[in-house]
């Protein structure tokens, strides 16, 4: 075995020192670059996550108030529809009793005239229900769920949002409502609309949804959100 001369020549020491320095410099540069890239990537993801979160909150706010307006518009017609159905039931009951009794009827209450009134009421009910369905369809055309769909197509970012699962719960009600556009069961559709409003209100009140974010994206509408939000206690001091 060949032994190295001792002590090492200066030029060997210099070469080794240079080599070690180059290696250390390369390692430090690699680590620094890796860390910098990681920080930049993480910062970009956080920025994208926050933008996504804000966009979804804006969309929830739009749906919330669009549905509130829809409910205000249709509540009166739907109440009228219920009144019409009650009258219709009474008329049909009167027709059945008339048919079974065999009594001679007054001209104003003949089965034929009662039947014509029932047909008229059926037409009114159909018109009210069609108005409701077309209004609901128009609402979803004007206020789609594009932001939420985009968020769900990027789950690695969306589920970094702390309230992602609460947002999912709200949109579940909204998606059920969207499936009811062609439904003839208007009462069930109305219940889905109300359940979405309730899910948002309860999310705000319970802290599952960020009340401050709602305020930041729509301060003018914020006061109407959260039906049970308690106002600050009055100052009773004299």
Image (cartoon, rainbow, N blue to C red):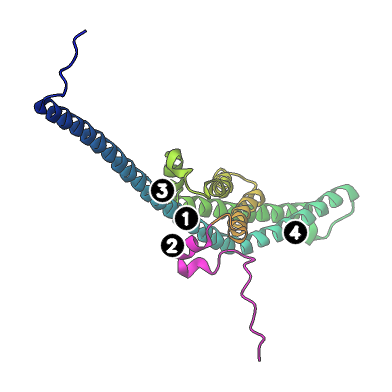
Residue extending furthest toward the bottom: 238
- Residue at 55 percent across and 51 percent down: it is 133
Which portion, as a residue range, is magenta?
210-238
Label 1 to label 3: alpha-carbon separation? 12 Å
**Residue 65 numbered tag:** none
Sequence order check: which comes first, mark 1 or mark 3?
3
Between 84 and 143, the one lying in front of the other is 143
Depth check, mark 4 against mark 2: the one in front is 2
Using residue 84 as the reference point, say whether residue 9 is left or right of it: left
At numbered mark 2, what does the secondary structure look like: helix, strand or loop? helix
Label 4 to label 2: alpha-carbon separation? 47 Å
Tell me if residue 15 comes above or below residue 68 in the rendering. Answer: above
Q: Which residue is mark 1?
A: 57
Depth check, mark 3 against mark 2: the one in front is 3
**Residue 49 numbered tag:** 3
Q: Which residue is mark 2?
A: 217
Q: Residue 8 appears in which quarter of the rendering? A: top left
Sequence order check: which comes first, mark 1 or mark 4?
1
Using residue 5 as the reference point, say whether residue 208 is left or right of it: right
Label 1 to label 4: alpha-carbon separation? 44 Å
Residue extending furthest toward the front: 6
Between 56 and 21, the one lying in front of the other is 21
């Amino acid at each position: 075995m060949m032994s190295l001369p001792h002590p090492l020549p200066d030029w060997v020491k210099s070469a080794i020192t240079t080599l070690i320095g180059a290696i250390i410099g390369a390692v430090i540069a690699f680590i620094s670059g890796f860390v910098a890239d990681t920080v930049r990537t993480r910062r970009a993801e956080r920025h994208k996550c926050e933008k996504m979160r804000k966009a979804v909150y804006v969309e929830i706010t739009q749906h919330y108030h669009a549905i509130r307006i829809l409910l205000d518009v249709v509540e009166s017609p739907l109440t009228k529809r219920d009144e019409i159905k009650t009258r219709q039931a009474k008329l049909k009951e009167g027709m059945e009793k008339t048919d079974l009794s065999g009594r001679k009827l007054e001209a104003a209450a003949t089965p034929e005239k009662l039947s014509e009134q029932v047909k008229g009421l059926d037409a009114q009910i159909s018109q009210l229900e069609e108005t409701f369905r077309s209004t609901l369809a128009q609402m979803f055309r004007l206020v789609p769920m594009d932001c939420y769909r985009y968020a769900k197509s990027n789950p690695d970012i969306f589920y970094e949002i702390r309230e992602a699962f609460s947002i999912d719960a709200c949109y579940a009600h909204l998606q059920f409502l969207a499936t009811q556009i062609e439904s003839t069961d208007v009462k069930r559709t109305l219940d889905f609309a109300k359940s979405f409003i309730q899910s948002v209100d309860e999310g705000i009140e319970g802290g599952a949804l960020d009340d401050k974010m709602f305020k930041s994206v729509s301060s003018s509408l914020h006061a109407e959100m959260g039906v049970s939000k308690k106002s600050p206690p009055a100052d009773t001091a004299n």
